[in-house]
Amino acid sequence: MSSITETPWWDPRRRPDRLPFLKGRNRITRAARDWFETQGFTEVETAALQVSPGNEAHLHAFSTTALTTDGQPTAMYLHTSPEFACKKLLASGEREIFSLGKVWRNRERGPLHHPEFTMLEWYRANEPYQAIMVDCAALLATAAEAAQAAVLSFHGREADPFLEPERLTVAEAFDRYADIGLLSVLDDREALAASARSAGVRVAADDGWSDIFSRVIVEKVEPNLGHGRPTILCEYPASEAALARPKPGDRRVAERFELYACGVELANCFGELTDPDEQRRRFELEMAEKARVYGERYPIDEDFLAALAQMPPASGGALGFDRLVMLATGAARIEQVLWTPVA
């Protein structure tokens, strides 16, 4: 006879264990929306179907086919983030917006990953990315208050959501946790590989610079972040900028930061790049890498690049809402905070 945890999520016997997490989710959802409203933000809804799901090499989308009235097919994708649509809204004249809705990512399943999940994404026009750091700290406190939690917790690790987050550059983190002088190996794959091996990180023969960088982050840096208090990990190398702009005065790094609590990545945030030519160059590099590794590539949203040229200077954040709920309610797996998990 199977145990209760092996039964479907809708089994009535599981409801008493599930309900506290789900009620906590509802309270946090209301509190987050209230917080944005008091800050003067406008909530927006973005289309889930897009011509491009995003152009990151290791991001995997769900694809479908849209048919015209005469049956002509067009490839479409479920969005992996509302980012492209939100930036088009900024180009249209919106200034402070947020989106709280479903996104989809393929090849993702585990305690912290689900193929369908909720993303909280927000943008401030004409604001520095440090303003998003302040927002992140406020959202952690807001979620904890709504859940009536004194601490954020995950698998025995805790962080005080009411303390000012630690701010740590990626270079400082590499030095502290892996004894790697990151800024001295930015253009040297072999030097980074040697340093990573010395730190006990496995390096494969076909690993590129970014692969090695990511492995050091995951194995040596992330487990040490957000203990006792949240951590803001900032100033990523320019090669890892994604959609972030270069840091003024030091183009070796970008205005990108990630928010951590209890060793868990919660948010990815940018001072937003508004140069369509540079963004196209980055997209093409990412899609070339995707083709090399996975044998496929996603189209570039030309409409997005056109809008980017009209977008005002802005900063924004993307926060995994389900993970925030997990840490505020003490859930161990993401399915515990989802009303109807994907089977």
Image (cartoon, helix red, strand yellow):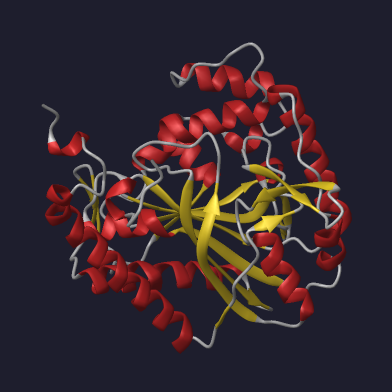
- Quarter-of-image position of residue 302: bottom right
Residue 15 rendering spot, x and y as whole percentages: 17, 54
Quadrant in which the C terminus appears: top left
Residue at figure coordinates x 35%, y 41% from the top left: 224
Would you place residue 292 above or below residue 234 in this image? Answer: above
- 79 and 167: which one is in front? 79
- 298 and 250: which one is in front? 298
Residue 180 appears in view: no
Q: Is residue 122 left or right of residue 218?
A: right
Q: Is residue 243 left or right of residue 147?
A: right
- Residue ranking furthest to the top: 205
Residue 120 rendering spot, x and y as whole percentages: 49, 64
- Residue ranking furthest to the front: 70
- Quarter-of-image position of residue 318: bottom right
Would you place residue 116 above or below residue 141 in this image? Answer: above
Residue at figure coordinates x 63%, y 35% from the top left: 58
Q: Is residue 259 left or right of residue 224?
A: right
Residue 31 appears in view: yes
